[in-house]
Amino acid sequence: MMKNILAITFTVAVSLCNAQVLVLPGDFPDPSVAKIGDSYWATATTSNWAPAFPLLESKDLVHWEQRGHVFKNLPSWADYYFWAPEISYENNKVYVYYAAHKRDGNLCVAVASADSPAGPYTDHGTLMCEKAGSIDAFPFRDNSGKLFLVWKEDGNSVKQPTPIWAMEMNESRTALTGEKFELFRNDVPWEANLVEGVSMIRHGEYIYAFYAGAGCCGRECSYAMGVARAKDLRGPWEKYDKNPIFNETEKWKCPGHGTAVEKDGRYYLLYHAYDGKSGVYAGRQGVLKEFKFTDDGWITLVEDALQSVKPAKVADDFSGRELSRDWQWSVFQPAQHKIANGSIELLAMPSEGGAFIAQKTFTEKYSAEVTLLRRGSQAAGGLALVGDDRNMIALTVEKDRIYILKLQDNRREILNESTISNSDRVVLKVDVTNGDQLTFSFRIGNGKFQQVNTTPVSGAYLPPWDRAVRVGLTARGQNDQKVVFDNFRLADN
């Protein structure tokens, strides 16, 4: 009997922090959700990781299963920064509005569509490309039923205000028509240099716009969320005088960029936040919070007894026919691989970090290991913590050498090098504490683990400003060479 390609074990625990429920563990920034049929479907930012935009399904908004991606092959017009997808459903058609960087241009908003939420999706290209950049698209129908696109002009990138615009869109979702008009912009102190990430919901006589303000990402983030309301899309828009309504807590930092959704007559916001312990290393994780509408026409947050989920273990034996959907690779250098004979053959690249595939991490304390099959491997292979193409730390086997490779700003440094005996199987392992303290070890065959570094290597420099650290496999060498791996494991300690 064929083993599962990937096994993920979940633990369930009662959320103790104002009922902010962790539902998408790991790096799922800017989550969006829509009800389609009897299920809820979500997606999220992937930035410079491919495939772009995961597709996840749930029956209860808490337990999610990944079903695929919007783009396994990236749209030809875009090259990187695949941000802020917004999934919506109307007239038996699924639409995903998204932002990406245009080749030889700036950030644009675009749209893709499918006949079912799992795809396949057809890209329809860009809808708006402003000089400063355009991001965070959201579709909405006004009181007359006309279809509009709402988005943010990325003025903060050029030290300018960030107006939220709307403009009519044709029913085929292939073009905007008429003139754009402004809804509101960053003009109160807590919003600092931006407002963005608008999502809207209609209730009673009002349209409510949830939005994020201040700094989204990284160690110095200051994100929070507010709400504004209007009786017509064209305004006037009124911001809640109790904003921001979503602030950071000891458990969840810098909440922002969410989508409102109704379930069984109750209302929830799916948004992202950094865990207070794992922070930037595990990234912006998907969090769920209930809210309700008040008698005076605003909203209040609800304390309820929903439960959080947390993945406890990832195990991949590479025994299926295809690579698990949880593996990712760089948009700049797609990794070539082959699943065969219960293992994965990763084709090498001559770049400083080599070819790599990686998976999300979930906490600040975890371990990962993989078996490198030296028989059949022709290039340098390793187990790595990856920030991006130019920044990683890997325990690497190359011929009779084993060493820690530190790649920082694309500069290679070899640490703790030694020789290794000739054996068909080498198990590589990394233990991580505090998110950035890395201790590597290896074992030959079924022997005992031997520690490579007695003083932890610091990975504090690894996470990019808008992404989290991932752990994965590397292969460095000529393009016709390969490294063979088996039995990848990732577990929280």
Image (cartoon, rainbow, N blue to C red):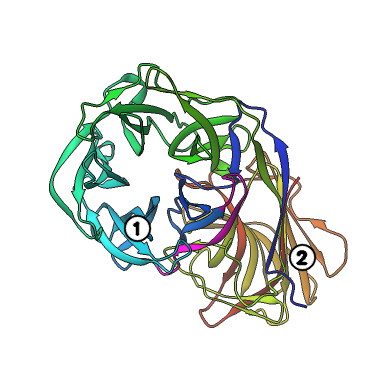
- The three-letter amino acid code for the residue at tag 2 is Val
Residue closest to the eye, 41 or 249: 41
- All told, the count of numbered labels is 2
Magenta stretch contains residue 71:
yes
- The three-letter amino acid code for the residue at tag 1 is Asn
| Side (left or right) of 74 relative to 22 | left
Instruction: Label 1: state its secondary structure.
Output: loop
Residue closest to the eye, 179 or 159: 179
Q: Which quadrant holds residue 215?
A: top left
Residue 41 pos. (x, y %): 49, 53
In this rendering, which labeled residue sits more in front, label 1 or label 2? 1
Question: Does any portion of residue 51 appear in the rendered image?
Answer: no
Q: Which residue is label 1 attached to?
A: 91
How crowded pointer 2 is (Cα within 10 Å; few <14, some 14-19, many 20+) is rated as: many
- Rendered view: 165 above or below 249: below
Residue 347 pos. (x, y %): 56, 76
CB atoms of marks 1 and 2 within 8 Å = no
- Rendered view: 372 above or below 142: below
Magenta stretch contains residue 198:
no
Residue plotted at (50% across, 58% down): 55
Residue plotted at (53% across, 83% down): 480
Residue 181 pos. (x, y %): 16, 38
Q: Which residue is label 2 attached to?
A: 427
- Specify the segment rendered in magenta: 58-73
Residue plotted at (74% across, 72% down): 3
Question: Does any portion of residue 265 appear in the rendered image?
Answer: yes
Q: Earlier in the sequence, mark 1 or mark 2?
A: 1
| Side (left or right) of 141 relative to 260 | left
